[in-house]
Amino acid sequence: MAADIVLEFGPPSEMLNFPVAAKANLAQDLGALGRIEQGNALRTEVVSRTSARVGNAHPAVGQFANPDLRANCDIDPMPL
């Protein structure tokens, strides 16, 4: 697999529509798979884009920067 491919999603430029929390979680997953360099690059992108939008003081920036925290971006479907 080419170094510029992130899992099966294609190059990072194709991941523009992924929610930022999902990208942060993917960065954590890549690190867990031993793909440290790709995980760190994606995490850096997530942190820089988030801080540019909401400012460095926003709690999400700190959460996304911490490789030990997983973003809670799961949906809770309504019970039927």
Image (cartoon, rainbow, N blue to C red):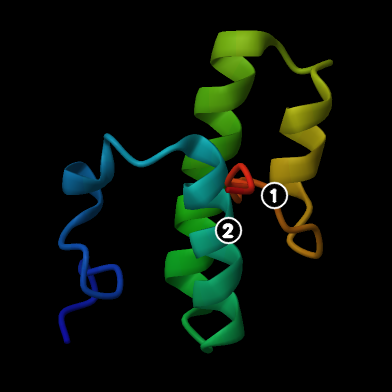
Q: Residue at x 83, y 26 (%)?
A: 59
Callout 2, which amino acid?
A: Asn
Q: Which residue is mark 2?
A: 25
The quarter of the picture where residue 40 lies is bottom right
Give the numbered dot on residue 71. 1
Q: Residues within 10 Å of mark 2 (few under 14, many from 20)?
A: many
Image location of residue 2, percent across then percent down: 16, 79
Image location of residue 68, percent across then percent down: 81, 65
Q: Eyeballing the image, is 27 above or below 55?
A: below
Callout 1, which amino acid?
A: Ala
Q: Residue at x 58, y 24 (%)?
A: 50
Mark 2–mark 1 distance (CA, rounded to whole Å): 6 Å
> Mark 1 or mark 2, which is nearer the start of the sequence?
2
Image location of residue 65, percent across then percent down: 72, 45
Give the numbered dot on residue 33. none
Circle 1 SS class: loop
Circle 2 SS class: helix
Q: Residues within 10 Å of mark 1 (few under 14, many from 20)?
A: some
Q: Residue at x 64, y 48 (%)?
A: 79
Image location of residue 10, percent across then percent down: 15, 62
Left or right: where 59 falls relative to 60: right
Query: Which of 19 and 1 lies nearest the eye of the viewer?
Result: 19
Q: Quadrant of the N terminus?
A: bottom left
Q: Residue at x 53, y 88 (%)?
A: 34
- Check if mark 2's residue and mark 1's residue have beta carbons within 8 Å: yes
Left or right: where 76 falls relative to 12: right
Count of numbered circles on the image: 2
